[in-house]
Image (tube, helix red, strand yellow):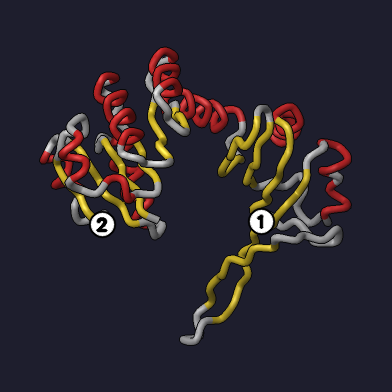
């Protein structure tokens, strides 16, 4: 996959580096040379150019990318111009950062495929960490519904999935278990390897260090979180 990331502030730079680490080919773009220099050894290609100029974008064959991420957050005008140019040059999927409701509306109108609201999403993440510190990861995939990775703690330790009654009591489905399995390495040292059970069975046992992946509604997750907080 070839991805262009435009705007190399904190959010854009982190996105570009993580995409590269996950195996994508990444073209990192910013008008500021110092920001480009900071990231050039951590992505496939980094270039300083003005994304509001069509000729400059054509020079890096921007129309060949599979996805473009417009991460510009300090200039709404530049963000809008970048999305406009990308759509004009035939980029099929354009993901754009919005910093306000009006900005989001305009980005939708000019053809952005997806909108990222960093500040809102970070607020949600921080609130979740405060209210539910046992949650490791949370993915919202539809309005009011999430996939959550968490440790269930002492309350469920040693119970089978049937005994936990998570489905009956909370209307949540366990879709995977991640376990740390001890083993002896070739040099004779004790170690652990992570094993994913992506088809958990009713008699599988939940251990203290297991990471459990659940899917369900926010309402039902909140009920579980409240009981976990009570111990």
Q: Where is residue 211 in the image (x, y as percent from the top left)?
A: 64, 53
Q: Reading the chain from its start, which is encountered first: label 2 or label 1?
A: 2
Other-residue count near label 2 (Cα within 10 Å), few / some / many at <14 / 14–19 / ≥20: some
Residue 93 quadrant: top left
Q: Residue at x 62, y 37 (%)?
A: 141
Q: In this view, does 204 lie to the left or right of 35?
A: right
From the viewer's side, name the closer residue of 120 and 165.
120
**Circle 1 SS class:** loop
From the viewer's side, name the closer residue of 10 and 52.
52
Q: Name the residue under label 1.
A: 210
Q: Position of residue 178 (x, y in %)?
A: 64, 59
Q: Is residue 183 above or below residue 104?
A: below
Quarter of the picture containing the C terminus is top right
Q: How many marks?
A: 2
Quarter of the picture containing the N terminus is bottom left
Q: Name the residue under label 2.
A: 44
């Amino acid at each position: 996959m070839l991805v262009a990331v435009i705007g190399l502030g904190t959010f854009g730079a982190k996105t570009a580096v993580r995409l590269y680490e996950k195996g994508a080919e990444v073209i990192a773009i910013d008008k500021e040379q110092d920001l480009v220099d900071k990231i050039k050894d951590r992505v496939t290609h980094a270039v300083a150019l003005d994304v509001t100029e069509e000729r400059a974008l054509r020079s890096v064959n921007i129309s060949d990318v599979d996805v473009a991420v417009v991460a510009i957050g300090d200039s709404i005008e530049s963000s809008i111009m970048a999305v406009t140019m990308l759509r004009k040059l035939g980029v099929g999927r354009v993901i754009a950062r919005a910093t306000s409701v009006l900005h989001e509306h305009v980005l939708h109108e000019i053809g952005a495929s997806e909108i990222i609201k960093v500040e809102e999403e970070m607020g949600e993440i921080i609130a979740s960490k405060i209210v539910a510190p046992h949650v490791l990861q949370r993915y919202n995939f539809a309005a009011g519904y999430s996939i959550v990775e968490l440790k269930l703690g002492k309350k469920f330790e040693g119970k089978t999935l049937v005994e936990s009654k998570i489905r009956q009591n909370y209307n949540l489905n366990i879709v995977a278990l991640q376990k740390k399995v001890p083993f002896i390495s070739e040099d004779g040292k004790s170690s652990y390897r992570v094993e994913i059970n992506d088809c958990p069975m009713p008699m599988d046992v939940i251990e203290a260090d297991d990471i459990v992946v659940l899917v369900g509604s926010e309402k039902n997750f909140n009920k579980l979180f409240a009981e976990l907080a009570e111990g």
